[in-house]
Image (cartoon, rainbow, N blue to C red):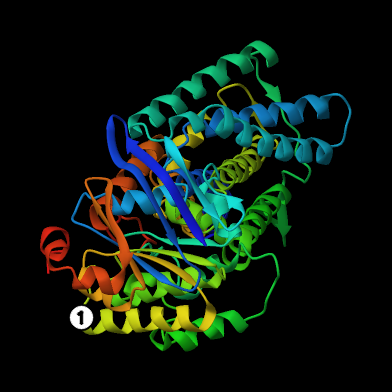
Amino acid sequence: MLAVEDLTAGYGPVTALDGVSFTAARGQITAVLGANGAGKTTLLRTISGLVRPSRGSVRLGEHDLTTVAAERMARLGLAHVPEGRGVITELTVEENLRLGRLVRLRRVGAGDLDRAYALFPALAQRRRQSAHVLSGGERQMLVIARALMAEPTVLLLDEPSLGLAPRIVVQIFDLLASLVADDGLTVVLVEQNARSALSIADRGVVLNLGRLVVSDTAAALAGDEQLRHAYLGF
Amino acid sequence: MQQLITTVLTGLTLGMVYAAFALALVLIWRATRIVNFAQAPMAMITTYLALVLIDAGLSYWVGFAVALVSGLLLGALVERLVVRHLTGSSEINAVILTLGLFIVIHALAALVFGSRYRSFPAPFGLRGFQVGDTTIALTGFGVFTIVSVMVVMGLLVLLFRGTDLGLKMRAAAFDQEISRLLGVRVGRMLTLGWALAALVGSLSGLLIAGGGLVHPSYMDGVVVYGFVAAVLGGLESPPGAVAGGLILGLALSLVSGYVGSELVPLACLVILMAVLLVRPGGLFSHVRARRV
């Protein structure tokens, strides 16, 4: 279980995140929703150690992650897929995937690559090509596949649907739902596309101007018309 | 005909030396997006270390090994103590900083080692091989130069293409944040990049010094040629740097042999301009916009 307590962070004098607390249960998808500038991305960046919190704590199981550096998070089972598809375009598709598994102590053969290609057949055809040639949807698949190579227990996903065709979004969300169901992965999903996110999430957290507005089950959030109009835009 | 062969062989040997220096520049550029103008005096210092040991009676190869290892350490040290503090500041700061290092190391070398010319030995013959009754322009030391640079380039390609460490170094060079999130210790990779570069730079220092004279500024002329060679190769790829070095060495040797040696520096800059006009990304880069 990922537990965030009173998390506060900012950039210089600007407070982007103000006393946010929530928990993401194991084997569930927790959607983080809110308008632009609500603090969603900062929340993920603070959890994964890219931004230092000025107050509050982040715990994963019995580990206190609050002061852990970003480069150690992957070893502790936390994977963060940042916004804007962090494919390293100078590397090939397969090199990107290999990069994902380097943190694992147990050396494995090509088995895990095969698993990634089975999940994302589109990547298998392009394994030797530069990641530069991938489409937006393929890039999103690659970064998710790369994050999974480390066999994380928690996956932080920042706007995976951004700029993708609805058909591709459905495909990616279906895959997420099956990963959670099959492997007990814990997912924290940041989305502007609140309707789609709530359709696969178990719980939702709504942020506004850096503060937590409400935290409830996805069904309750989707059913609250006032809240939807005020913060979720649908 | 014989003049052509002589010119080509001289050009190849010379080109390999430029290639080694270009390799050092490329390694640092790839890792930290800095053109290390201090590469020449760094290599000069390590060559002096070798010279001190050799003059003290140790074998050439002990000096050679010490120069390479001290290059490795010096590169790591410069990155950790100086370059590290530039993170996030403007690109011009890096230029000023490496130029500053250039001057400081120069001054230190003159203080410690003196500024007179000292001769540096070569491990292999400096006389051309005999083919029939003619002497060709390829010397034992020339062969050593060519082989050692090819070996270093081969090892670098193996490192970058074939190992996990090389993959991490490339990833760290291209995207620091993503690399950190994937567990790569970016700082270490950058230090290692500088260390490797300084090692290759030291090799170029030794190759240039071999059988010649060293002096605190003996490497300075190579900066321009090495830089042009690196740009010809696209500043990104180690094989590009070697190819750039060879092309430049051959071209300059032909200019020197057939036109006049006083035109060599001019020819070098003309080649640079021509390449930048036709292929701004260098001869061996797939031109591609970065910085998203």
- How many residues crowd around disc 1 within 10 Å: few (fewer than 14), some, or many (20 or more)? few
Residue B136 visible: yes
Left or right: A228, with A179 as reference point: left
What amino acid does circle 1 point to?
A: Pro
Q: Quadrant of residue B165?
A: bottom right
Left or right: A168, with A109 as reference point: left
Q: Nearer the viewer, residue B21 or A3?
A: A3
Residue B11 visible: no
Q: Nearer the viewer, residue B219 or A103?
A: A103
Q: In the displayed structure, would residue A54 be above or below residue A30?
A: above
Residue B63 at what x, y percent from top left? 79, 35
Q: Could you tell me which residue is drawn at 46 percent across and 21 percent down?
A: B100
Q: Nearer the viewer, residue B277 or B127?
A: B277
Chain of the residue on which disc 1 is drawn: A
Left or right: B116, with B292 as reference point: right
The residue beneath circle 1 is A166
Q: Nearer the viewer, residue B14 or A120?
A: A120
- Residue at the extreme right: B57
Q: Quadrant of residue B146?
A: bottom right
Residue A212 at what x, y percent from top left? 29, 50
Q: In the displayed structure, would residue B42 be above or below residue A195?
A: above
Q: Could you tell me which residue is drawn at 20 percent across and 80 percent down?
A: A166
Residue B126 at what x, y percent from top left? 72, 43
Residue B117 at what x, y percent from top left? 65, 19
Left or right: A198, with B224 as reference point: left
Secondary element under disc 1, as helix, strand or loop, is helix
Q: Could you tell me which residue is drawn at 51 percent across and 57 percent down?
A: B170
